[in-house]
Amino acid sequence: MLRLYDAARRRVEPVVPAGARSLRLYAFGPSAGHRPHLGDLRSFLLADLIGRLAGRRRVRVLACHATDGEAFADDLPALNVRPPDRSLPVDEAATLVSGFAPGVIELGTPPGLIVFDAGLPGIARWTGSGRLLFEGRELLAGQGGEGAVRLRDVTEAGLDPLAVRLALLGHHYREDAELTWDALRGADGTLRLWRFRVATWSEAPSAPMPADRVAAIEDALDDDLGSPAALRLMDELERDESLAPGSRFEAFLHLDQVLALDLPSEIGRSRPPAG
Protein backbone atom coordinates (compact mmCIF):
# COMPACT_ATOMS: atom_id res chain seq x y z
CA MET A 1 0.00 0.00 0.00
CA LEU A 2 1.39 3.38 -1.02
CA ARG A 3 2.07 5.68 1.92
CA LEU A 4 3.03 9.35 1.69
CA TYR A 5 3.87 12.16 4.05
CA ASP A 6 0.79 14.25 4.86
CA ALA A 7 1.95 17.83 5.45
CA ALA A 8 -1.24 18.70 7.35
CA ARG A 9 -0.93 15.86 9.86
CA ARG A 10 2.89 15.72 9.72
CA ARG A 11 3.06 11.98 9.40
CA VAL A 12 3.17 9.30 6.74
CA GLU A 13 -0.30 8.00 5.86
CA PRO A 14 -1.82 5.62 3.29
CA VAL A 15 -2.68 7.53 0.13
CA VAL A 16 -5.71 5.37 -0.58
CA PRO A 17 -7.51 4.29 2.61
CA ALA A 18 -9.28 0.95 2.84
CA GLY A 19 -12.49 1.00 0.84
CA ALA A 20 -11.45 3.74 -1.59
CA ARG A 21 -10.95 2.80 -5.23
CA SER A 22 -10.19 6.18 -6.78
CA LEU A 23 -7.71 8.99 -6.24
CA ARG A 24 -7.79 12.60 -7.39
CA LEU A 25 -4.41 14.29 -7.75
CA TYR A 26 -3.92 18.04 -8.07
CA ALA A 27 -0.45 19.29 -8.98
CA PHE A 28 0.01 23.06 -8.80
CA GLY A 29 2.37 24.77 -11.21
CA PRO A 30 3.49 28.35 -11.84
CA SER A 31 1.46 31.27 -13.14
CA ALA A 32 1.21 32.51 -16.70
CA GLY A 33 4.19 34.20 -18.29
CA HIS A 34 6.72 32.09 -16.42
CA ARG A 35 9.15 30.02 -18.46
CA PRO A 36 9.34 26.68 -16.62
CA HIS A 37 12.70 25.53 -15.33
CA LEU A 38 13.71 22.25 -13.71
CA GLY A 39 12.50 23.45 -10.31
CA ASP A 40 8.98 23.83 -11.70
CA LEU A 41 8.93 20.30 -13.06
CA ARG A 42 9.70 18.42 -9.86
CA SER A 43 6.14 18.50 -8.50
CA PHE A 44 4.67 17.22 -11.76
CA LEU A 45 7.16 14.36 -11.76
CA LEU A 46 6.15 13.61 -8.18
CA ALA A 47 2.45 13.60 -9.02
CA ASP A 48 3.11 11.34 -12.01
CA LEU A 49 4.99 8.83 -9.85
CA ILE A 50 2.20 8.85 -7.24
CA GLY A 51 -0.37 8.25 -9.96
CA ARG A 52 1.58 5.38 -11.50
CA LEU A 53 2.07 3.67 -8.13
CA ALA A 54 -1.59 4.05 -7.19
CA GLY A 55 -2.68 2.79 -10.60
CA ARG A 56 -0.57 -0.31 -10.12
CA ARG A 57 -2.90 -1.13 -7.21
CA ARG A 58 -5.87 -0.89 -9.57
CA VAL A 59 -6.89 2.46 -8.18
CA ARG A 60 -8.54 4.79 -10.67
CA VAL A 61 -6.41 7.94 -10.79
CA LEU A 62 -7.75 11.30 -12.01
CA ALA A 63 -4.97 13.85 -12.42
CA CYS A 64 -5.41 17.60 -12.62
CA HIS A 65 -2.65 20.09 -13.48
CA ALA A 66 -3.27 23.52 -12.04
CA THR A 67 -1.25 26.09 -13.94
CA ASP A 68 -1.95 29.30 -15.80
CA GLY A 69 0.74 28.68 -18.39
CA GLU A 70 0.97 26.53 -21.51
CA ALA A 71 4.75 26.27 -21.43
CA PHE A 72 4.65 22.76 -19.98
CA ALA A 73 3.18 21.32 -23.18
CA ASP A 74 6.56 20.10 -24.45
CA ASP A 75 8.47 19.56 -21.21
CA LEU A 76 6.11 17.15 -19.45
CA PRO A 77 5.76 14.62 -22.32
CA ALA A 78 9.55 14.64 -22.68
CA LEU A 79 9.75 13.57 -19.03
CA ASN A 80 7.11 10.84 -19.56
CA VAL A 81 4.63 12.68 -17.35
CA ARG A 82 1.25 11.38 -18.36
CA PRO A 83 -1.17 14.01 -19.68
CA PRO A 84 -3.65 15.15 -17.03
CA ASP A 85 -7.30 14.24 -17.16
CA ARG A 86 -8.04 17.88 -16.52
CA SER A 87 -6.22 21.23 -16.55
CA LEU A 88 -7.43 24.23 -14.58
CA PRO A 89 -6.23 27.76 -13.87
CA VAL A 90 -4.48 27.98 -10.51
CA ASP A 91 -7.19 30.10 -8.82
CA GLU A 92 -10.01 27.84 -10.01
CA ALA A 93 -8.20 24.71 -8.87
CA ALA A 94 -7.44 26.31 -5.49
CA THR A 95 -11.11 27.09 -4.96
CA LEU A 96 -12.09 23.56 -5.92
CA VAL A 97 -9.52 21.98 -3.63
CA SER A 98 -10.49 24.16 -0.67
CA GLY A 99 -13.94 22.59 -0.81
CA PHE A 100 -12.68 19.15 0.21
CA ALA A 101 -9.30 19.97 1.78
CA PRO A 102 -9.96 22.77 4.28
CA GLY A 103 -6.86 24.75 5.13
CA VAL A 104 -4.99 24.12 1.91
CA ILE A 105 -6.05 27.50 0.54
CA GLU A 106 -4.21 29.11 3.45
CA LEU A 107 -0.97 27.88 1.94
CA GLY A 108 -1.55 30.21 -0.97
CA THR A 109 -1.38 27.21 -3.33
CA PRO A 110 2.33 27.64 -3.94
CA PRO A 111 3.82 26.06 -7.06
CA GLY A 112 4.92 22.56 -6.10
CA LEU A 113 1.90 21.79 -3.90
CA ILE A 114 0.25 18.40 -4.48
CA VAL A 115 -3.18 17.56 -3.09
CA PHE A 116 -4.43 13.98 -3.13
CA ASP A 117 -7.97 12.98 -2.29
CA ALA A 118 -9.51 9.51 -2.21
CA GLY A 119 -13.04 10.87 -2.11
CA LEU A 120 -13.76 9.99 1.52
CA PRO A 121 -14.85 12.77 3.90
CA GLY A 122 -12.19 14.43 6.01
CA ILE A 123 -9.12 12.66 4.70
CA ALA A 124 -7.89 14.82 1.82
CA ARG A 125 -4.16 15.35 2.17
CA TRP A 126 -1.38 17.38 0.65
CA THR A 127 2.36 17.20 0.31
CA GLY A 128 5.15 18.78 -1.65
CA SER A 129 8.72 18.33 -2.76
CA GLY A 130 11.87 19.81 -1.33
CA ARG A 131 13.91 22.59 -2.87
CA LEU A 132 15.83 22.02 -6.06
CA LEU A 133 19.28 23.50 -6.53
CA PHE A 134 21.35 23.40 -9.68
CA GLU A 135 25.10 23.89 -9.34
CA GLY A 136 24.44 25.53 -5.95
CA ARG A 137 21.75 27.93 -7.20
CA GLU A 138 18.19 27.41 -5.96
CA LEU A 139 15.53 27.02 -8.64
CA LEU A 140 12.45 28.30 -6.87
CA ALA A 141 9.20 26.90 -8.24
CA GLY A 142 7.21 29.66 -9.88
CA GLN A 143 10.19 32.00 -10.13
CA GLY A 144 12.58 32.41 -13.01
CA GLY A 145 15.64 34.56 -13.01
CA GLU A 146 18.98 34.59 -14.71
CA GLY A 147 20.73 31.27 -14.84
CA ALA A 148 17.61 29.13 -14.40
CA VAL A 149 18.24 25.78 -16.07
CA ARG A 150 15.47 24.53 -18.31
CA LEU A 151 14.80 21.18 -19.92
CA ARG A 152 15.77 22.62 -23.29
CA ASP A 153 19.22 23.37 -21.88
CA VAL A 154 19.54 19.70 -20.95
CA THR A 155 18.63 18.41 -24.40
CA GLU A 156 20.84 21.01 -26.11
CA ALA A 157 23.72 19.65 -24.03
CA GLY A 158 23.13 16.30 -25.76
CA LEU A 159 21.53 14.62 -22.76
CA ASP A 160 18.34 12.56 -22.67
CA PRO A 161 15.60 14.57 -20.91
CA LEU A 162 14.77 11.45 -18.90
CA ALA A 163 18.17 11.87 -17.26
CA VAL A 164 16.42 14.61 -15.26
CA ARG A 165 13.73 12.16 -14.18
CA LEU A 166 16.30 9.56 -13.14
CA ALA A 167 18.49 12.11 -11.36
CA LEU A 168 15.53 13.38 -9.32
CA LEU A 169 14.49 9.82 -8.46
CA GLY A 170 17.90 9.55 -6.86
CA HIS A 171 16.76 12.06 -4.21
CA HIS A 172 13.91 11.56 -1.77
CA TYR A 173 11.07 13.82 -2.87
CA ARG A 174 10.78 15.61 0.50
CA GLU A 175 14.47 16.40 0.71
CA ASP A 176 16.31 19.22 -0.97
CA ALA A 177 17.99 17.98 -4.12
CA GLU A 178 21.03 19.44 -5.82
CA LEU A 179 21.67 18.63 -9.46
CA THR A 180 24.80 19.38 -11.40
CA TRP A 181 25.81 18.89 -14.99
CA ASP A 182 28.03 16.04 -13.85
CA ALA A 183 25.08 14.41 -12.08
CA LEU A 184 22.93 14.70 -15.20
CA ARG A 185 25.69 13.23 -17.35
CA GLY A 186 25.96 10.38 -14.85
CA ALA A 187 22.20 9.78 -14.98
CA ASP A 188 22.32 9.86 -18.78
CA GLY A 189 25.06 7.22 -18.71
CA THR A 190 23.02 5.02 -16.38
CA LEU A 191 20.02 5.28 -18.70
CA ARG A 192 22.14 4.23 -21.68
CA LEU A 193 23.62 1.31 -19.74
CA TRP A 194 20.28 0.04 -18.44
CA ARG A 195 18.66 0.32 -21.87
CA PHE A 196 21.58 -1.55 -23.42
CA ARG A 197 21.32 -4.25 -20.78
CA VAL A 198 17.56 -4.60 -21.25
CA ALA A 199 18.04 -4.90 -25.02
CA THR A 200 20.72 -7.56 -24.50
CA TRP A 201 18.63 -9.48 -21.96
CA SER A 202 15.67 -9.45 -24.37
CA GLU A 203 17.56 -11.85 -26.64
CA ALA A 204 17.87 -14.46 -23.87
CA PRO A 205 15.23 -17.10 -23.03
CA SER A 206 12.40 -15.75 -20.90
CA ALA A 207 12.49 -16.47 -17.17
CA PRO A 208 10.29 -15.49 -14.21
CA MET A 209 11.10 -12.27 -12.38
CA PRO A 210 13.01 -12.63 -9.11
CA ALA A 211 9.88 -12.04 -7.07
CA ASP A 212 11.61 -11.25 -3.79
CA ARG A 213 13.96 -8.70 -5.37
CA VAL A 214 11.16 -6.97 -7.26
CA ALA A 215 8.95 -6.93 -4.15
CA ALA A 216 11.75 -5.22 -2.18
CA ILE A 217 11.99 -2.49 -4.81
CA GLU A 218 8.23 -2.01 -4.88
CA ASP A 219 8.11 -1.90 -1.08
CA ALA A 220 10.74 0.85 -1.08
CA LEU A 221 8.62 2.91 -3.49
CA ASP A 222 5.44 2.27 -1.51
CA ASP A 223 7.12 3.47 1.71
CA ASP A 224 6.89 7.25 1.24
CA LEU A 225 8.39 7.00 -2.25
CA GLY A 226 11.77 5.67 -1.25
CA SER A 227 13.10 6.05 -4.78
CA PRO A 228 16.81 6.33 -3.81
CA ALA A 229 16.64 2.92 -2.13
CA ALA A 230 14.69 1.50 -5.08
CA LEU A 231 17.36 2.67 -7.53
CA ARG A 232 20.14 1.16 -5.41
CA LEU A 233 18.32 -2.17 -5.41
CA MET A 234 17.84 -1.95 -9.18
CA ASP A 235 21.54 -1.30 -9.63
CA GLU A 236 22.30 -4.42 -7.57
CA LEU A 237 19.81 -6.39 -9.65
CA GLU A 238 21.38 -5.21 -12.90
CA ARG A 239 24.84 -6.31 -11.73
CA ASP A 240 23.83 -9.69 -10.31
CA GLU A 241 25.10 -12.16 -12.90
CA SER A 242 23.78 -15.07 -10.83
CA LEU A 243 20.31 -14.18 -12.10
CA ALA A 244 19.22 -15.32 -15.55
CA PRO A 245 19.19 -12.51 -18.16
CA GLY A 246 15.56 -13.26 -18.96
CA SER A 247 14.67 -12.86 -15.29
CA ARG A 248 16.31 -9.45 -15.08
CA PHE A 249 14.66 -8.47 -18.35
CA GLU A 250 11.19 -9.18 -16.99
CA ALA A 251 11.98 -7.36 -13.74
CA PHE A 252 13.24 -4.19 -15.44
CA LEU A 253 10.27 -4.07 -17.82
CA HIS A 254 7.88 -4.49 -14.92
CA LEU A 255 9.51 -1.77 -12.83
CA ASP A 256 9.70 0.63 -15.75
CA GLN A 257 5.91 0.81 -15.82
CA VAL A 258 6.27 2.99 -12.72
CA LEU A 259 9.69 4.57 -13.21
CA ALA A 260 8.91 5.50 -16.85
CA LEU A 261 12.52 5.67 -18.02
CA ASP A 262 11.92 4.09 -21.46
CA LEU A 263 14.15 1.17 -20.55
CA PRO A 264 12.93 -1.05 -23.46
CA SER A 265 13.68 1.64 -26.06
CA GLU A 266 16.86 -0.04 -27.39
CA ILE A 267 15.35 -3.47 -27.93
CA GLY A 268 16.09 -4.59 -31.47
CA ARG A 269 18.94 -2.16 -31.94
CA SER A 270 21.29 -3.01 -29.09
CA ARG A 271 24.75 -1.52 -29.18
CA PRO A 272 27.34 -0.74 -26.53
CA PRO A 273 26.36 2.24 -24.38
CA ALA A 274 28.19 5.49 -25.03
CA GLY A 275 31.09 6.16 -22.70
Image (spheres, grey):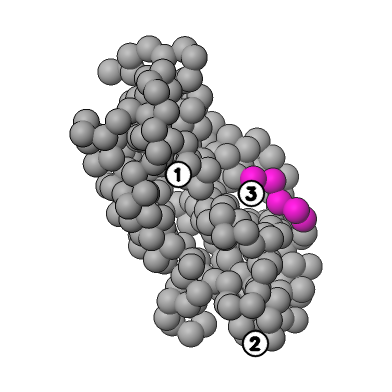
Taking depth in this image into account, of 272 and 239 the one nearest to the observer is 239
Q: Amino acid at mark 3?
A: His
Asked if the residue at tag 2 contacts the one at tag 1, i.e. Cβ–Cβ closer than 8 Å, the answer is: no
Residue 86 at what x, y percent from top left?
A: 77, 55
The mark found on residue 122 in the picture is: 2
Quadrant position of residue 100: bottom right
Q: For numbered disc 2, what is the local secondary structure?
A: loop
Residue 133 vs 119, above or below: the answer is above
Residue 87 at what x, y percent from top left?
A: 76, 55
- First to last magenta residue range: 82-86
Q: Is residue 154 magenta?
A: no
Nearer to us: label 3 or label 1: 1
Quadrant position of residue 227: bottom left
Taking the image as shown, residue 116 lies to the left or right of residue 240, namely: right
User: Which comes sooner in the sequence, label 3 or label 1?
Assistant: 3
Q: For numbered disc 3, what is the local secondary structure?
A: loop
Q: Residues within 10 Å of mark 3 (few under 14, many from 20)?
A: some
Q: Residues within 10 Å of mark 2 (few under 14, many from 20)?
A: few
Q: Amino acid at mark 2?
A: Gly
Residue at 65 percent of width and 87 percent of height:
122
Residue 22 at what x, y percent from top left?
A: 68, 67
- How far, Cα to Cα, is label 3 from label 1? 34 Å
Residue at 43 percent of width and 62 percent of height:
222
Residue at 28 percent of width and 18 percent of height:
275
Taking depth in this image into account, of 221 and 149 the one nearest to the observer is 221
Residue 156 at what x, y percent from top left?
A: 49, 24
Question: Label 1 belongs to which residue?
Answer: 255
Nearer to us: label 1 or label 2: 1
Q: Amino acid at mark 1?
A: Leu
The mark found on residue 34 in the picture is: 3
Taking the image as shown, residue 239 lies to the left or right of residue 206, namely: left
- How far, Cα to Cα, is label 1 from label 2? 33 Å
